[in-house]
Image (cartoon, grey):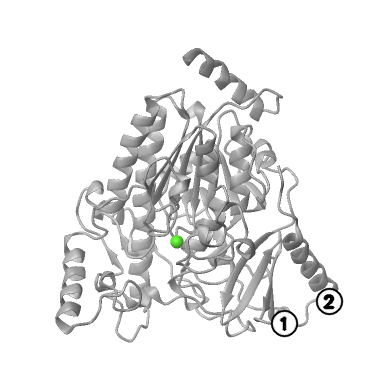
Amino acid sequence: MKRRMGIGAVAGVLALAGGAAAAERLNVLFLASDDMRPQLGCYGDPLVKSPNLDRLAARGRLFERAYCQQALCSPSRISLLSGRRISTTKIDQIGPTLRSTMPDIVTLPQMFKNAGWHARSLGKIYHVGIDDPASWNEPPWHSKAPRYGPAGMERVKARAAEMKAKGIPIEEKGPNRPSFGGPAFEGPDVADEALLDGDTARQALEALRALAKTPDRPFFLAVGFANPHVPWVAPKRYWDLYRPEDIRIPTNNFVPRGAPVFAAKSGQDFLWYGNIPKDRVITPEFGRQCLHGYFAAISYVDAQIGLLLGELDRLGLREKTIVVFWGDHGYYMGEHGWWGSKHNNYEGATRVPLMIAAPGMKSAGRPTPAVVEFIDIFPTLADLAGLAAPAGIEGRSLRSLLDDPSAPWKAGAVSQYRMGGNFGTALRTDRHRYVEWVDKQGAVAGRELYDHATDPGENVNVLDGAPADLVRGLAEQLGAVLRQPARTP
Ligand SMILES: [Ca+2]
C-alpha cells in the first residue's frame, strides 16, 4: 500500500503540471479564520505581522481579489461549503441549516468523505450550532477553552449573574447576551493555549498526528479559528508586536455618498460590548485601541496556523497535502464610520483573504489579480483531488490560475445581501462594483456604481451620470453571471 502511495505522489505532481496522469488522493488542510479581512503582510500591509500566512502565500497562490458570496458568517460558509450562490442556497441569514433548503446536496467535505477521505472539523467551520453532521466522519469538535482571559471572563460572568438577579432572560442574541458583558478587546498575559484558538490549534495538531498514522487513507481536516471576530482577544505578546502610534485610523468616516439609505448601513453587534463608550462615539484613541486588538488577534491566529503548517512539514505531508486558507468575509474597521462589522454589499465587507498551496504547483509565490469567488473553491479542490464535483456546483475550478497566475478568468464576482427588505446583487469586475437592489415584488429598488480606478474607497455612488452603455454592459454581465447554468459533471 505504501509503495502505491509513493507512485501516486509523483502522479499528483505531474497532473498539476498539466500531465494526463491520474490525480493522487491528496490530503486537504482547510484553514478558516472568522472576520479576517485581507490585511496581512502578504497582501501588502506594512504593519500587520503575519509571517506564517506570508510563508504559505510564498509557497502557494495568493488571490489578491477574492470575494465571498455574502458578508455574513453562516450564509458565506454555507455557500462556500455547498458551492452555490446565495440566490441558490436561499440562506441569507444566520439560523437555518443548509439542509433546510438543500436537503440532498453533497457538501465539499462530504464529497471527500464519500470518496474515502477522513473528513474532520475542529473549531468554527460551519457557523457554531448550525453544523452539518453528514459533512464529517466524526462529530465536529469545539474547544471549551475560554474566549477571554481571566478578567474578561469575570465580566462575562458578572453580566450573566446580574441578568439572573434581575430576572432578565439570557438571550443568545441581542444586547443582553452575556458575552457582551466582556470588553471588545483584551490582551491577557496568558499562554496561547489558555484561550480558545490556541486550544483549537493544539487539538488540531493531535488530529493531524493521528491522521498521519494511516497514510493510505487521505484526510480532509478543517480547522476554523474564532479570531479576529470581535472580541479581539489575543495574548499580550501579540499586542506587543504593534506600537499604538503606528496605527492609522481611516479618514473616510462617512457612508458612501449617493448610496441608497437602506444599503449604506452595517451591523451593530460591536457597539454592545462592555467597554464601548456609552455615547457610542468611537474617538480616534479608542479606534486605535480597537485596531490594535484586531491586529493582535490576526497575529494570534497566524501563529496558530504556523503550528499546523510546521507540523505538516514535520510529518512529511507537505507534498501530499493541499492547503487552503480563507476568511469568511471582509470587515470594516472605521471605513465609512463602520466599526467591527461586515453586513453589507460593499468592497470592504465582501473582499476576503484566500490562498491555496498545492503540491507541484507552478510559479508558486506569485499572486494572481484575477477576480475570483468563494464558490470556486469547491470545484478547485474536486479538480485537484481528481474527484467529480457533484451536479449543481456554480463555481469554476481555479486550476488554470494555480498553473498560471495571469491566466484568463471570468468577468467578475457576485456578492449578495438582503437589506431593508430589498435583495442586492453586487457584481465586482476588474474595475467596477455595480449593485442592483430589487424589492419583494422584483422591482428595482436602487442601483449603485463605484469606480475603483478613481475611488478605491467606494466613497461616491457614480451611477447617476455614468455612461449609459457602461451601466447597461454591467447589468448584462450581472444577469449573465446569475443565469449561468449550474455546472454539471
Ligand atoms: Ca464571520
Q: Which residue corresponds to mark 2?
A: 468
Q: The residue under label 2 is which amino acid type?
A: Ala
Q: Residue at x 59, y 28 (%)?
A: 360
Q: Residue at x 62, y 27 (%)?
A: 23
Q: Where on the image, by quarter, is ligand 1?
A: bottom left
**Rendered location of residue 393, percent (x, y):** 65, 50
User: In this picture, is 347 found above or below 221?
Assistant: below
Mark pair 1, 2: CA separation: 20 Å
Label 1: which secondary element:
loop
Q: The residue under label 1 is which amino acid type?
A: Ala
Residue 329 in view:
no
Figure quadrant of the C terminus: top right
Q: Earlier in the sequence, mark 1 or mark 2?
A: 1
Label 2: which secondary element:
helix
Q: Nearer the viewer, mark 1 or mark 2?
A: 1
Q: Which residue corresponds to mark 1?
A: 443
